[in-house]
Each structure stands twice: as C-alpha cells, then as structure tokens.
Amino acid sequence: MRGTAKKNNHEIRDPIYAFVHMDSSEREVLNSVPVQRLRHIHQLALTSLVYPGGTHRRFEHSLGVMELATRIYNAVLENGETDILDIDGKYDEMYYLRVLRMAALVHDIGHAPFSHASEDLFPRDCNHEAMTLRLIESDEMEKLWAMLKIQTEDVAKLALGRDHPKKKTFSNTEAILSEIITGAFGADRMDYLLRDSHHTGVAYGRFDHYRLIETLRVLPKAYEDRSKEPALGVEIGGLQSAEALLLARYFMFSQLYFHPVRRIYDIHLREYLQAWLLGGRFPVDVTGHLNLTDNEVMAGIWRASKDPDLPGHGVAKRIMMRNHYRVLYTRNPDDVLKYREAGLAIYTAASAAFGEENVRHDRPKIPASQVAFPVLEPDGRIVSSLLKSDALRHIPEVAVDTVYIRPELLDAGRAWLNENRENIIKSGSELEDTA
Amino acid sequence: MKQIQRDGLLFELIDELTDYGSWCGETHIQKATYFLEAMMGIPLGFPHVLYKHGPFSFDLSDELASMRADALLEWEIKPEPYGNALKTTSVSAGLKAKVPRTLARYRPAISFVAEKFGTRGVKDLEKISTALYVTKEAPGRGCEARARRITELKPHITLDEAKEAVCFVDEMFREAEPVIREIE
C-alpha cells in the first residue's frame, strides 16, 4: 500500500551542518515575508570587496542558528543541572524548544540593509533589535505564533536577550535560554564564525563545535565567591574546544570583521545611504522596512556611481571603483598607555589640518569576549576557566582605533603625522578635569 | 561626565573595594556600580537590566573588557576553588592622577559603597542589589511588598532573605543621605 500521509518533517541542505531540520508548521515561519527578506541581506555587508567569497546572506545564518540552538538545548537538558534554573514542575521542555527554535530563526529579522554596517542610520531610539521586536509583534508573525501555540513575548525575550529594547527582567531559565542563542557559547556566535569562515576562506574561524556542544553544561559560577548564578560552561573535556572557539573569535575579529579596509567600506556605505535615504534615515514602519533590502541599495550605488547628478555620486563611485580612504593611523599599545583616546586626538588634529571631509575615524565598541566561564572537573568541583587555561588568560580583547585619509592625501598625511604625532597624543592626555 | 572621568571613578571603586577586603570579581564591581548610580546618583551611564542574579550592565561588562585590552585592568587569578578577580594597573593609576577634582567630589560616595560591600559575598550582593532594584521600581512601596516582589522575580531567594535585604537597603539609604548631599 502506498503511503498518502503528508510529509511533516523537512530537511534543508546546508554547507556547514549538512542538513537543517524543521517541521511543516515551522516552515510557515520560514516562508513569512520577514524571514524570506533575509535572503537579500548580506551577512557581512560589503566584505566581498575584500574577501570575494563573503557574499552569503542572513537567511542561511538564521537557519544555522536554529539548528545549532536545538543541538545545544538538547545537550544541555540531557546533561542535567536543570535544578539551578529555578525550573519548577510546570517547565515544558517541548514548549521551550519550540520557542527557542523560532526565536533563533527570527533573531535577525530587524536588520536593515547591510546589517551592522548601517545600524547608525536608524532614527533615534530605534535599532535593529527594536525593529526585530516590532516585526515579532507584527500581525503576520502574531498569527504564526498563535498557530504554533507559543507566546509572542517569549519569542521576543529569547531572540533579543540582553539587547531587548524594553529592558525586560530575566529569570534564570529565560537568561540561559537566551544565552543558548546569543551568549559566548551561543548558536549565533558559533554559526557566524563557522559560516563566515567557510564562505570567506578565512580558516581561523573553524573549531570543533561537535565536541563543544556535547560538553556544554549549565553550571553555577561557584568560582566567583561561591555564587550560585547559573551560566553556560563546559565539562573539562570540552575546554580545548571552548578555547578554540574563543581563539577563533579573536582571529576572525582581527582578520575579518575589523579588517581596516572592510571597516572603511562600512563608513563609505553609511555615507552613501545618508545621501540616498529619505531624510538620511531608514524607515521604521513594518512595510517600509520589509520593502528595503541590499538589492535596492546596490542598484542605487551602481546608478549613482555613473550619474554625477544623483545623490551620493562621489561616494558611490568610490565604492564601485574601490577607491576607498586609506589608513593614516592605527591603534598602537604605546600610544594607548599615554592617552586612551589617541585616535580621536589624531583624527581631530588631522581634520583641522586637512579638512573634516578628507578624514575618517573608526573607534567601534566591541563586545567582551567572555573568556571566564565555569568548568566542571571530573570530581564535581566547579572552577573558573581562567584557572584551567593559560590560553584563555592570554587571549587579547580586540580593540580598534583607526584614522583614515583620502587616498590623494595619504603621503602628505603620513609626513604630517610623523612630525606631529607625539605632540598630539601628549596634548590630548592633558585634558582639564572639569565637570 | 567625560570618559576619562568615568574611567577614573571605576578604577577608584576597584581600588577601594580591594582595600576594604572585597574579592573584587566582576559581580562585585557590577553590583557596586549599580549602587553608585541608583543610590548615590553618580551619572556613570551604565544601564542595568534585572538579569539572572540581580541588576547587571552589559555595557559595563564590555567596558571592563575594553579596559583590559588597554592594559588598564588585569586579571588576578586566585587559587582553586576560586577564580578570577580584577585589579587596576600602573597605567590606570596614572590615568586616575589626571582626574583629581572628579575623584575628590565622588570619593566619599565610592568609599561609602565600598565599605558596605567590602566583606560581603556575591550571594549577599545579589540579594541587596535586587532589593535596591525593586525599591527604585516602585518608590514608596512597603517592606513586605518589596520582599514579595523580590521572591517573585528571583524564586531562589526566600521571603526572609528578601525582607532582610530590603531592610539593609532602607538603612543604607538613611546612612547615605549626608554623603549624597556632599556630592550634589
């Protein structure tokens, strides 16, 4: 007899995990407009101008995060320790698995074109997390959550975690579940390192995620003054794979995400968008957001680069012809010891010498790498990762402080900097201590 | 407040916590910073959310990492079963020396908090900082109501522990009044 039942479980091929799994109900979320739009948002903005393979999109990343979050959740529950999560008899494992998977799938839907590169162009009091919340609460998505029998607020809390725009309070359980997506050993970080490494060819991003996931545990941070605060940690056998992830992050941040040429393209892209967008800002209504992707922006840049009468012509041409601003000054530890804001001082002085329009400054705020986490010893003791690992103690935090100058002024700029550098940094360090 | 001034105050806090016998892990710094802002009114600019075990600022966490990158703070690794604490460096001492007026203005408030926190463990700090959070959440609410709110938010804290934490915070507010007046 031939089976006539409709297929309920589906597999999507993926270059990192072979398959991503989902059921028919979840596929309706995948087919929603906000998630499908991610097919048209690059994961790494204009990185392909530096690393040509980096053209992948947030769509496949979101699928990957959902798959990894599921694997982490299953490993953590299988390994026990749920008593420290304030979980009572009402905890529904399957309910939270569903919430977690959907939160992982939609965690990036609020990104504007070119993701982080254009984050500053949201109007005041808005950012991609606020847009994500707005979309999770939109009519289209609310109907899907109701169909899946999950609460909108739960999806939003887990998807946004620490960056929830309404500054929610988090129970231990909610905090750990959101860390499964967004934390140091979260699915988001694991997936972007593996996927970005795969596509760009920057091999440093690889690590043994299979081993790491198998050894993840929810443990009290007992090493911190006998605290009972739960955190994602590892069994001792997973320490090397945790080290590998954190080293991968360090290398990828310094080699790829904060590559100086990649960063200046972010700045040029923002300049173009400011000229091209109505009022220089992204729309924040749901329809306006959903209608705008990288495709419209790239078409705009292409046209503007050829037509001097179009807004943003100069910078569009700069992007298309790869005539970006060049590095004049880059962070130097010796300068930091003299004055923490050395880059800002040099930027200010260079702007006065060469004109503000010819100089750019990049000093991004970089999230902590979180190298301290609980490690479970074979005898049941819980100790700090920093006590067990020389490697973790010595992973540097990434810091960026770069000044760029128009290419035609690079030689003059370098000569000027050689002559004035010490004085500029010294005078910056002698700022008056006034309120 | 300029960044250099805020940096100087954080280094002063870490030094004073250490001097008063605090173990000075990140949790100690997190909770003490919350008290400096929410009780003493020092505008450090670190927004806190109520996280796993009490108020927590992810911005502060990132800033502490950035200070390690700039050699302004370093890990101090304590023997098993303990772990990592943070301490200032000669570079941060040099930076502190550049903001004498700011330090003079806010030092009494920092000393007040550091003295109260110095010998307290993390578990205690989690309770009293959550007590301050619920006190600020709805000013004027009675002790019993605030204690119940704490147990609602953090089920691992018992009602008696919550009441004790609320009383401690109320008493601390009373003692802090002259110090707060001094820095205004």
Image (cartoon, grey):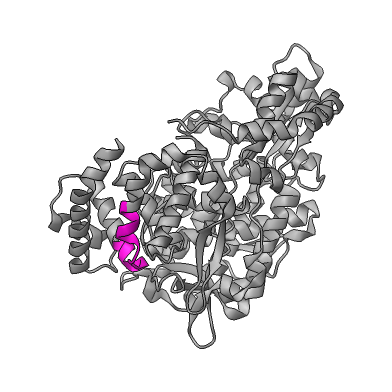
Along the line of sight, which residue is nearer the eye, B138 or A17? Answer: B138
Q: Is residue A22 visible?
A: no
- The quadrant of the picture occupied by the C terminus of chain B is top left
Looking at the image, residue B165 lies above or below residue A383: above
Membership of A27 in magenta stretch: no
Membership of B118 in magenta stretch: yes
Single out the residue that lies furthest toward the bottom: A379
Part of the protein shown in magenta: B112-127
Q: Main secondary structure of the magenta part?
A: helix
Q: Position of residue A71 (x, y in %)?
A: 57, 69
Looking at the image, residue B125 sits to the left or right of residue A192; the answer is left
Q: Position of residue A171 (x, y in %)?
A: 36, 60
Looking at the image, residue A372 lies above or below residue A336: below
Q: Residue A342 falls in which quadrant of the image?
A: top right
Q: Residue at x 41, y 71 (%)?
A: A225
Along the line of sight, which residue is nearer the eye, A199 or A34? Answer: A199
- The quadrant of the picture occupied by the N terminus of chain B is top left
Q: Position of residue A63 (x, y in %)?
A: 61, 55
Along the line of sight, which residue is nearer the eye, B152 or A16? Answer: B152
Q: Residue at x 38, y 73 (%)?
A: A84
Single out the residue that lies furthest toward the top: A309
Q: Residue at x 33, y 60 (%)?
A: B117
Along the line of sight, which residue is nearer the eye, B26 or A55? Answer: B26
Looking at the image, residue B149 lies above or below residue A380: above
Looking at the image, residue B73 sits to the left or right of residue A435; the answer is right
